[in-house]
Image: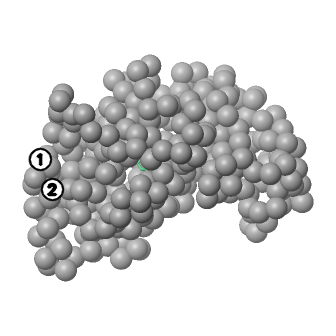
Amino acid sequence: MSRVIRAPEELRDFCDVLRVRQERIGLVPTMGALHEGHLSLIDQAREHGATKVLVTIFVNPLQFGPSEDYTRYPRSLEQDIALCESKRVDAIFAPETDALIPSSHATFVEVTGALTSVLEAVHRPTHFRGVTTIVAKLFSLVGPCTALFGRKDYQQWKIIETMTRELQLPVTIVGCPIVREPDGLALSSRNRYLSAEARKRALRLPQGLLRAQRAYQEGQRVRKELLRIACAEIEQGADAIDYVELVDPNTLQTSPDKLVEAALLCAAVRVDTTRLIDNLLLTSAG
Ligand code: AMP
């Protein structure tokens, strides 16, 4: 049985006891509505040496903009607990909203500068400070651990890595591969918003990324041309495109006109009312 923890103080005590027993904690922060992408992070935690795995489930209001889907975001705690148990997760931290964010809450943790001025940050200006505030809080409660994040949210991973390094937090950050449906769509809790018709159109997003990758592997290095190839496909499925960009995988700044190094192709689109993001690292191999 996975232990379900509701109170932040109980989480801190639980983790302290584990460390006294020489256990190594793997932390998997999520917003719940768990799917195979989340579950892969649990496996990755063990592969990275965790002897105890802790999953947190918290729909964080601070990371949603005023016109975003906070109220309709899927919540399925009972099912999530069952999935965690099937993966032998040791504990689930699922606090009430005001246990982490009381109405008086006025402290934010924010990574500033280039990483938080591009891509998602342009379209979701308060998103990342909401994420880093809660993730910093989780790190503070859990203490020394290895924390696993999906590269599906590539920019989030890089920002959390930066926050952790710059605040000198005792946490090792691991970025994990994107898990996809057999047809290529990246798993996301938001996929359940899609109608069958929209789901079909959403597929153009990974297909566009793959087309550009194929061109890259055939020798295409002109940034504009790679973006044109990706967009031509993506446009056929999306109702709106927030961005399709080629960036440096470390700095997330726009790649040069002619690529010389590996580049991250990333995109955000809307299909019906559902916003989807995806990315693919363009490299010569594989
Ligand atoms: P979320 O519940 O959407 O906040 O996601 C929690 C964690 O799961 C984040 O680190 C995400 O990047 C990761 N994640 C979500 N979808 C996927 C996926 N398809 N593959 C790998 N990781 C994912």
> Residue pushed farthest bottom?
22
The location of residue 201, given as percent across then percent down, is 67, 30
Q: Is residue 45 above or below residue 189?
A: below
Measured in 3D between alpha carbons, the distance from the residue under mark 2 to the one under mark 1, in whole angstroms, is 7 Å
The local secondary structure at tag 2 comes to helix
Q: Nearer the viewer, residue 63 or 167?
A: 167
Q: Are marks 2 and 1 in contact (CB under 8 Å)?
A: yes
Q: Secondary structure at mark 1?
A: loop
Tell me the amino acid under the disc marked 2: Leu
* Residue visible at 82% across and 61% down in the picture: 260
Q: Is residue 210 above or below residue 119?
A: below
Q: Is residue 187 left or right of residue 145?
A: right
| Total labels drawn | 2
Residue drawn at the location 36% of the way across and 27% of the way down: 70
Q: Residues within 10 Å of mark 1 (few under 14, many from 20)?
A: some
Query: Which quadrant of the structure image shows residue 218?
Result: bottom right
- Residue 227: where, in percent of width, then height? 80, 41
Side of 235 relative to 105 (left or right)? right
Q: Any atom of ligand 1 within 8 Å of the CB at mark 1?
A: no
Q: In the image, is 163 to the left or to the right of 105? A: right
Q: How is the image coloured?
A: one colour
Residue 278 as seen in the image, left or right of residue 259: left
- Check disc 1 and give the amino acid type: Ala
Q: Name the residue carrying label 1.
A: 7
Residue 145 in the image, given as x and y percentages of width and height: 30, 67
Q: Which residue is mark 2?
A: 11
Residue pictured at 54% horizontal, 36% vertical: 121
Residue for point 74% across, 67% down:
286
